[in-house]
Image (cartoon, grey):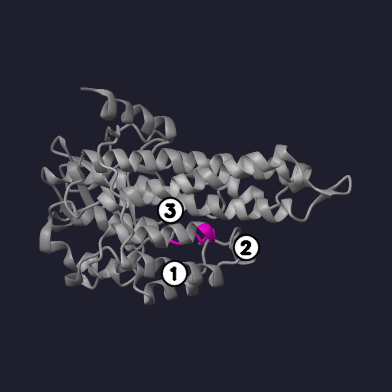
Amino acid sequence: MSVVGNTALQFSEEQAMLLDVAREFCRDKSPISSVRAQLESAAGFDQAVWDEMVALGWTGIALPESCGGSGMGVATVVPVVESMGRAMLGTPLISTTLAGQLLLRSGAGDSLEPVLADIAAGSPASVALLENGDWGDERLSCHVDSNGQLQGTKKYVVNAAVAALFVVVVEHEGAPALALVRAQELPAGAISPCTLIDQTRRAGNVDFSGVAVPREALITGSAVASALRDFRLLGALLLAAESTGSAASCLDTVVDYLKTRKQFGKLIGSYQALKHPTVEILNAVDSSRSFIYHAASLVTEGPLDKDTEIACRMAKAQATDTLLYAGDRAVQFHGGMGFTWECDAQLYIRRAQWAQQQFGDAQHHRKRLASLLLDS
């Protein structure tokens, strides 16, 4: 009997269609030369490409039809994100999708339809969650004071510079709550850019102190805590999907090099010392894909159950470890050139270092899996 309990693995027709479209789109719009061209840009992505993604309806895939979405659920976002990871395409899609899911699951109901409609229409959004670098620390010091103003700073807010909407996780009357803050409501200088190891990403520290939060922009209630739990798990799943795609791309880079680089008159791909780790990467990528689509098979629109939590945590631990190993081998196989900025192996190992930490690293998830799987 499986220790997981639920081993369902389904790949719907909608997911297959999205995977085909997304792979072709990302391959055409994000060759490695375009990825490198965006590394030093302010936004980190091409606005024209983002506009095309919005036109394809990707920002509304997981949102209800009542607010302009496709109503296909967050599971159908997984193949799109995997394809983005394979092309190393950096856009606000993941942060925007997760913000929408947090709001959907918060229990606020129809009052959020205008906000969700903006997200479905392509307005970038981001969740301001962390107050330090520890994803396991769920304590909140950012709060709404007696004057209805926010007090506190959030760290490493993804896509902070381009987000039109911030979903700020705050403490209100002793319980977690969500405050909706539009970018134009922030005072000048509120966003301080962060320097990230993965230069395909952008994040910033945001000081929300003094921002007024009207009652209609504050979401409270018991459903918020459950929504935050699901947000963390869905974030882990989408990061796992992206990492799986990036690991597959890293494997392609490794294989291409092994088939062209010669040493002592022989292709280096003929040496077993390089063949075996390459096969290990291939097996690990295949395992990662199984994990992410197993988790996607279990995700529902309601609160995520124990089996889904197990699947999401397993997917995150497996996928990011796979990318870390693939990136490390890519650097080593390229020799001295692998340590230079000009070598594409650097892009993968840097993404691996960043992705490992987001929504908890492998150790974080395995520690929680131990109690989920082994406690009676």
Foreground residue among 208 and 180: 180
Q: Which residue is mark 3?
A: 189
Foreground residue among 243 and 355: 243
Looking at the image, is mark 2 or mark 3 nearer the viewer?
2
Looking at the image, is mark 1 or mark 2 nearer the viewer?
1
Task: Say what amino acid the circle numbered 1 marks.
Answer: Asp
Residue drawn at 48 percent across, 44 percent down: 355
Residue at mark 2 to residue at mark 3: CA–CA distance: 33 Å
Question: Which secondary structure dominates the residues rendered in magenta?
Answer: loop
Sequence-wise first label, 2 or 3: 2
Furthest residue to the right? 264
Residue 240: horizontal and vertical position, in percent? 42, 47
Foreground residue among 274 and 68: 274
Residue at mark 3 to residue at mark 1: CA–CA distance: 42 Å
Q: Which residue is mark 1?
A: 20
Foreground residue among 371 and 90: 371
Residue 252 appears in the picture as rendered: yes
